[in-house]
Image (cartoon, helix red, strand yellow):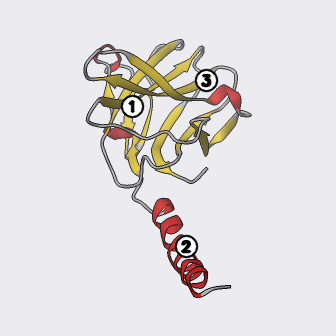
Amino acid sequence: MNKMMIALWLAVATWLPVCVASAQSGEPWTAVATTGAVDESDLSIVSMSSSTVSFAASSPAAENIVVRYNVTATAGIGGQSDNFSLRFRDNGAQARVIAVLRQVNMNTGAATVLSTIDSDSYPPSASFRTVDGGFGSCGFEYDFYENAYFIEVTLSRTSAAGLPALQLLQLYGALC
């Protein structure tokens, strides 16, 4: 090997781990469920306690609650790929939690669904759990100059036995 190749190999070996670590270690965007904006029509049926959004005890048996979360720019989202995590409870067929990450273009107003997490895609559980939903493609990068982003979460129940609840949301970068 000549000296130029050795120097190039040493440079790559030294900086590659730093670049990979930087891409994975940025600060994620996070929100506790109680920081969201509840639809005005749902204010009488929602319960917000500590970090959890759920149905109020006095709410009708079959109902929906819609809560929206504004996504702001952080160093940890963007990059080569992004993941979307949600901590929720869905105790069975009478409960459902759907979270949709949307992008809205500043010039056209066109809204695009980037990712969806649906609790019905997972086995029911009376306990909270955290699930990850990727975007399904590498190379996605947020563009906060051209777009705004938000997550819309719908808690649904078809009877009083349904106990859907939301606790945390997170967006974070990861390598493909």
According to the image, label 3 marks what residue?
A: 95
* Disc with the residue nearer the chain's start (3 vs 2): 2
Three-letter residue code for mark 3: Ala
**Circles 1 and 2: CB distance less than 8 Å?**
no
What's the residue at 57%, 19% (across, down)? 160
- Marker disc for residue 22: none
| Mark 1 or 2: the one toward you | 2
The part of the image, by quadrant, that contains residue 75 is: bottom left
According to the image, label 1 marks what residue?
A: 47
Three-letter residue code for mark 1: Ser
Residue 76: give x, y in percent of width and height: 41, 54
Mark 2: few/some/many CA within 10 Å (<14, 14-19, 20+): few
Three-letter residue code for mark 2: Pro
Q: CA distance from mark 3 to mark 1?
A: 16 Å
SS at mark 3? Answer: strand
**29 or 148: nearer the eye?**
148
The part of the image, by quadrant, that contains residue 159 is: top right
Residue 83: give x, y in percent of width and height: 54, 44
Q: Is residue 158 above or below residue 72?
A: above
Q: CA distance from mark 3 to mark 2?
A: 44 Å
Q: Is residue 21 above or below residue 131?
A: below
* Disc with the residue nearer the chain's start (1 vs 2): 2
7 horizontally vs 143: left or right? right
**Circles 3 and 2: CB distance less than 8 Å?**
no
Residue 121: give x, y in percent of width and height: 69, 29
